[in-house]
Image (cartoon, rainbow, N blue to C red):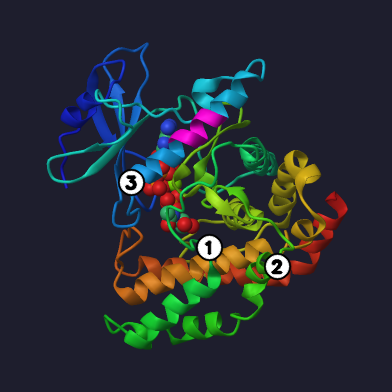
Amino acid sequence: MVYNLKEIFDYFDADGTFLKGEPYGSGHIHDTFRIETVEAEKDDYILQRLNNRIFKNIPELQHNIERVTVHLRNKLSSIPGSDIKRECLQLIPTGEGKTWLVDNDGNYWRMYIFISNHHSFNVVDSPDEAFEGGKAIGRFQAMLSDMPGGQLFETIPSFHDIEKRLEAFFKKVNENPVGRVESVKKEIDQISRRTDEMKIILRLGKEGKIPLRITHNDTKFNNILLDENNKALCVIDLDTVMPGYIHYDFGDAIRTAANTTSEDEDDLSKVKMDISLFKAYAEGYLSETISTLNDIEIEYLAFAPKLITYTIAVRFLTDFIDGDNYFKIHHKFHNLQRTRAQLSLVMSMEEQYEEMKKIIRNLT
Ligand code: ADP
Ligand code: GN1
Ligand code: MG
């Protein structure tokens, strides 16, 4: 689809003149464009066509992001030396004062200042980067822990609820809408064998042993920007910030930060969890959060990466069986390739589980 990006850009109250817009980043949900401005000294922007099939209530979604970013900016303003424009997403309102726009074709758009000179990683190269990512998420959770104004809107209900995700998965397996089930029997079996153990975090929540907190819920490493020196800079992609268990954020970050290769690696022999990256991320994360977590939350941190990697595998395979209606794909078997890579990663985590538990014990 070709959009008139200049016309859309001009509806927003930006400082600077549109020069050009190009697709940007590797997110799986929205259509994201980087807008460059004519004036060298003025900001560039990120313009996004929002996926309103997935996020069904864009005004409430945007209201969440306004609340979260206002709160983060207030916090940052009391920290000497902070670079507020780069450490927190900044929404640009339209001329009418709203933080989103609906175009004549019914597309929803929003715009942020482009965070300059950042580094973004799909695969993490070193323990130092993993440590910084852990610090960024820990600090993010800590800063949001006292956000006023009541609960955030649940932008995608039951987002990480593995019981509901499995129900949806087995329903699709039974329906077999596009005839792909026969070809994925092995993966269905790998998922089926692990269903019971994956429900433990939900159970601990229901028993009141771990609290719901404000969590990010999509802490894949490319949603954490590092600065030019690879120090923690900014947590982006705030669409799913809402109540959750801290295990969801810890688990999703390890799924991506400690994987030795990309999320959709075709050569499964390369897919491994690197224990030194796990340790470094955990160190960074706990350096910001240890005083606020309860003993049970800490005890189950090592379990979290298995749960979230498994959950994402279930979601990729559900989408493959359904005919690819949710995640953006770049070829016909992309969701299956992603599923296989994520299941391999779960197995690598299972092999190293005792070591992961030991590392968390030693850090706390
Ligand atoms: P998706 O939900 O599709 O992943 P994101 O909001 O994460 O969408 O944006 C996609 C990508 O665009 C990010 O991974 C990042 O590379 C880039 N991006 C998003 N917002 C900004 C920003 N304010 N500054 C710089 N890059 C950004
Ligand atoms: C999506 O938006 P993005 O690309 O950062 C997805 C996450 C998955 C991830 C898998 C709203 O994240 O839940 O973990 O893909 N986001 C949504 O790569 O579903
Ligand atoms: Mg993203």
Question: Residue lying furthest front in this view?
Answer: 150
90 left or right of 331? right
Q: Quadrant of ligand 2?
A: bottom left
- Please name the residue that numbered disc 2 is placed on: 204
Image height of 285 relative to 336, above or below: above
Start-end of magenta stretch: 66-71
* Secondary element type, mark 3: helix
N-terminal label among 1 and 3: 3
Residue 77 part of the magenta-drawn span: no
Toward the viewer: 268 or 98? 98
| Residue 227 seen in this snapshot | no
Q: Indicate yes or no: mark 2 CB to ligand 2 under 8 Å.
A: no
- In the rendered structure, which disc, 2 or 1, sits on the residue that comes first in sequence? 1
Is 316 left, or right, of 5 in this rendering? right
Residue 197: x and y in percent read 66, 77
* Separation of marks 2 and 3 at Cα, in angstroms: 32 Å
Which one is earlier in the sequence, the residue at label 2 or at label 3? Answer: 3
Residue 294, image x and y in percent?
79, 53
Q: Which sits in the foreground, 281 or 235?
A: 235
Residue 251 sits in which quadrant? bottom right
Q: Using the rendered view, name the quadrant where residue 287 is placed.
A: top right
For the point 87% across and 53% down, the residue is: 362
Amino acid marked by disc 1: His
Q: In this view, does 142 lie above or below 256?
A: above
What's the distance in space between the residues labelled 1 and 3, CA to CA? Answer: 20 Å
Q: How crowded is mark 3: few (under 14 residues within 10 Å), some or many (20 or more)?
A: some
Q: At 71% from the left edge and 72% from the top edge, which residue is drawn?
A: 351
On the image, numbered disc 3 is attached to which residue?
A: 58
